[in-house]
Amino acid sequence: MESDNNIPVISVKELVKRFGSRLVLDGISIDIEKGKTTAIIGPSGCGKTVLMKHMIALERPTSGSVYFKDHRIDNLSQKQLAGIRANYGFLFQGGALFDSLTVFENIIFPIRQRRKIKNFKEIEELVKSKLALVGLDGFQTQYPANLSGGQKKRVALARAIALDPKVILYDEPTTGLDPLRSDIINELILKLQRELSVTSIVVTHDMNSAFKIADRILMLHEGKIIADGDADYIRSHPDSIVQQFIKGTVGEAELAALRQAGTRTRT
Amino acid sequence: MIESIGRNTIGLINGVGMFGRFSARTVATSCASLLQPKTYPLIWLQMYNIGVKSVGVVMVTGAFVGMILAIQGYDQLHSMGLEERMGLLINISVVKELGPVLVAVMLAGRVGGALTAELGTMNVTEQIAAVESMGTDPVKYLVAPRVIACLLLTPVLIVYADMLGILGGYFEGVIQHKINSAAYWNYSAHGVELWDIGVGLTKGFFFGAAIATIGCYKGFNCKEGAQGVGQACTEAFVASFIAILAINYTFVVVAKAIYDTFWIGESLL
C-alpha cells in the first residue's frame, strides 16, 4: 500500500495540444496526488477543460503522454479505456444528463454499462443513496428538462459518483449558479472528498470556490502553468497576471484599450 | 486564390478520410453489436423510431407515385393503343427505381435529419463525451443501433412503398381509366421479375446504411450552437441525397451487367 500511495494518481508529461494551427497546451507536466483536491484556474478559453479532458483521454495529445497510476492512457483504444474509465467520474459543465432518460435511468447508466443488473431493489437503494448525498432524493422519475441548472449539476454529480470512482473531474462546477447554489456545490465537493476520500480535479474560474475547496491550485495561462501551490501561495503570488486574475481586476493595457474603443458599435 | 483552393482540397480530403474512419469503425462496431444480445433493446428502440414511425409517410409517397405515373402514362400509351401494358410500365418503374429511391430520399429527410439533430445536440451538450467518459463506446451505444435499424428496415419500408405504388397505379389505371384488369395484371406479371424486385430491395440496405452513417457522422462532428446543428442537418441531407444517387447509379450499372451476363435481355414492350 505504501508504494501505491507514492505514485501520482494522474500524471501528465510534456503535454502539447494543438487544434489546427492554434497551440492550446504548451508542454504541460503535472502530477496529481492521491486524495487531494487540485483546482486548475485560468481565464476562459485558456485550455483548462482541454487539459482535464486529456486526463480521462477524451482528448488525445498532439505530443506528450498521460498516465493513470502507472498505466499510460493517451494511446489506448476505446475498448482498453473502458476499464480505466470506471475509476473516473466526470462532471460536465452543463451536466450533460441524457435528456431522453429520467434521473433514475441517468444514474444507473454507468452501472448498467459495466454489469448486468440483477437485483433491482439494491440498485434502487444505491440510486436513493447517491441522490440523498447530493440532496435530491425523490427526483428519480423526473426528466432533466424539468430540473433547474443547479439541480442538473447535482444529478450529474450523483451520476458521476455512481460507480464510486477514485478520481472525480469537475468541469466548472459552479459556473452559472447563484452564490448560494455555488456554495452547495462547494460543500458537496468537500463532503465527497471527506466521505469517499476521492482525488478531485476542479477546473474553475470561480476564485471563492477554488480557495475554499482546493489543496493545491494551478494557474494556466497561454498554454503554460504559471503558478502552482496552495491557496496562500497563490494569494501572495508575485506575478501580476496571477494577481489580476484572482482579484478580478483588469490590467492597465486592457483598460486603455477599453477607453479607446467607442461605446457605440458601428453597424 | 490558390491558397483557398489548396485549403479546400485539404479540407475535403480530411473530411473524406475522417468519414472513412468513422464508417469503418461503425461497420466493425455494428457487426459486433449484432452478436451481442445486450444491445438488442437499443436496436428495437431505434427500429421503432426509424422504421415503424416512417411507415405512414412512405406509404403515402408510394401511393402517389403509382397514381401519378398512371395519369402521366395513360394518354401516351392510349394513343398507341398500348394502355393494357401500362401495368408493366408502372410496376417495373415503381419496384426497380422509384420505390427504393423515393423511400430513401424520404428517409434521408425524416430519419437522417432527426439523427443528425439528435446526435448533434448531444454532441454540443457534451452528452456524447459523457457516454465516453463512463467507459462506453459512443459509436457502439449511439451509432451502431441506429445504423443497424436503418439498414434492416429500409428494404421493409420499400416493400410498403412498392405495394402502395402498385395499388395506386391499379387504382388510376383499372378503376379510373377502365383498363382491362386481367390484361393489366398479365402484362405486369410477365414483365416484372423477381430479379427486379430483388434489385430494388437490395438497394434499400445500402441506402439505409448510407443515410444512417452520414446522419450520425454529421451529428458527431457538428459545430456548436443552434446554427451548428442546423448546418449539420442541411449537410447531412445533401450528402445523403448525393450518396443515394451515386449508390443507385452504381447499383444500376452493376445489376445490369450481372443480368446481361446470365440472362438475355428482352424488350419490355
Image: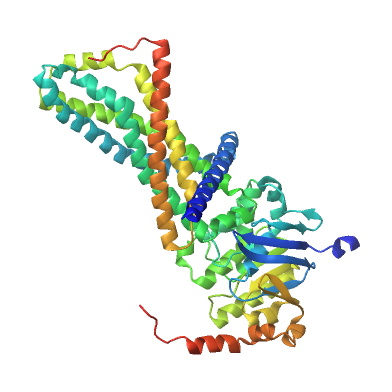
Q: Please indicate whether residue A9 sits to the left or right of residue B98 in the image.
A: right
Residue A89 is at least partly visible in this image: no
In the image, residue B7 sits, relative to residue B43, either above or below, namely below
- Tell me the quarter of the image containing the C terminus of chain A: bottom left
- In the displayed orientation, state which residue is furthest to the right: A2
- Residue nearest the observer in this picture, A145 or B216: B216
In the image, residue A52 sits, relative to residue A86, either above or below, namely below
Q: Residue at x 48, y 68 (%)?
A: A147
Q: Percent from the top left, x then y, of residue B138?
A: 57, 49
- Tell me the quarter of the image containing the N terminus of chain A: bottom right
Q: Percent from the top left, x then y, of residue B220?
A: 51, 52
Q: Percent from the top left, x then y, of residue B239?
A: 42, 44
Q: Please indicate whether residue A171 sits to the left or right of residue B167 in the image.
A: right
- In the displayed orientation, state which residue is furthest to the front: B2
Q: Percent from the top left, x then y, of residue A148?
A: 49, 71
- Residue nearest the observer in this picture, B97 or A119: B97
Q: Please indicate whether residue B77 sits to the left or right of residue B93 in the image.
A: left
Image colouring:
rainbow
Q: Residue at x 58, y 42 (%)?
A: B21
Q: Residue at x 43, y 17 (%)?
A: B258
Q: Residue at x 39, y 81 (%)?
A: A265
Q: Please indicate whether residue A241 sits to the left or right of residue B165 in the image.
A: right
- In the displayed orientation, state which residue is furthest to the top: B264
| Residue A36, image quadrant | bottom right
In the image, residue A182 sits, relative to residue A51, either above or below, namely below
Q: How many marks?
A: 0
- Residue nearest the observer in this picture, B38 or A202: A202
| Residue B57, image quadrant | top left
| Residue B101, image quadrant | top left
In the image, residue B254 sits, relative to residue B139, either above or below, namely above
Residue B96 is at least partly visible in this image: yes
